[in-house]
Image (cartoon, rainbow, N blue to C red):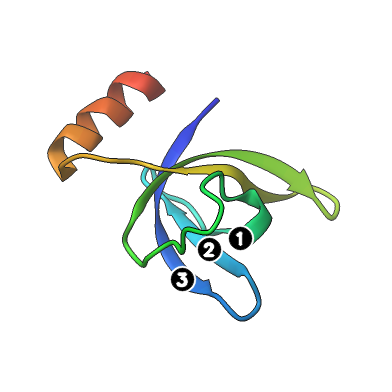
Amino acid sequence: MSHFGKIKSYDSSSGTGSITPEKGGDALRFKKADLQQEGQMPKVDQRFSYETSEVDGGKKTAVNLQAQQGDGQNQKDQASAQQG
């Protein structure tokens, strides 16, 4: 199931970052390898769809991140429709 969130931080030197879920909760870590658009640097507050995976004894991380296009309100409407 896809979730939506905004990039909270990204460190290009280490290739890691965090994304804040739109529906609330703690920010999730991700790695550069989890970005679907190779070579594209995520920007703070950029909206992405993602899936979650559990690592290290149940700790959740974001995987399969894909940048989302469009205006903010339309994105919220799409997120609500897709997430039920």
Question: Which residue position holds label 1?
Answer: 29
Circle nearer the N terminus (2, 3): 3
Q: Amino acid at mark 2?
A: Ser
Residue 18 circle label: 2
Q: Position of residue 65 (x, y in %)?
A: 53, 45
> What's the amino acid at mark 1?
Arg
Q: Nearer the viewer, residue 57 or 61?
A: 61
Residue that numbered label 3 is attached to: 9
Q: Residue at x 51, y 47 (%)?
A: 37
x, y percent for residue 6 = 37, 54
Q: Are marks 2 and 3 in contact (CB under 8 Å)?
A: yes
Disc 3 residue crowd, few under 14, some 14–19, many 20+, Cα 10 Å: some
Three-letter amino acid code of the residue under disc 3: Ser
At 53% from the left and 63% from the top, the residue drawn is: 18
In this rendering, would 70 be left or right of 46? left
Picture coordinates of residue 56 (x, y %)?
84, 55
Mark 2 or mark 1: whose residue is earlier in sequence: 2
Mark 3 touching mark 1, by CB under 8 A? no
- Expressed as whole percent of the image width and height from the top left, the position of residue 16 reads 62, 68
Exactly how many numbered labels are in the figure? 3
Q: Say which quadrant the C terminus sits in.
A: top left
What is the number of the mark on residue 15? Answer: none
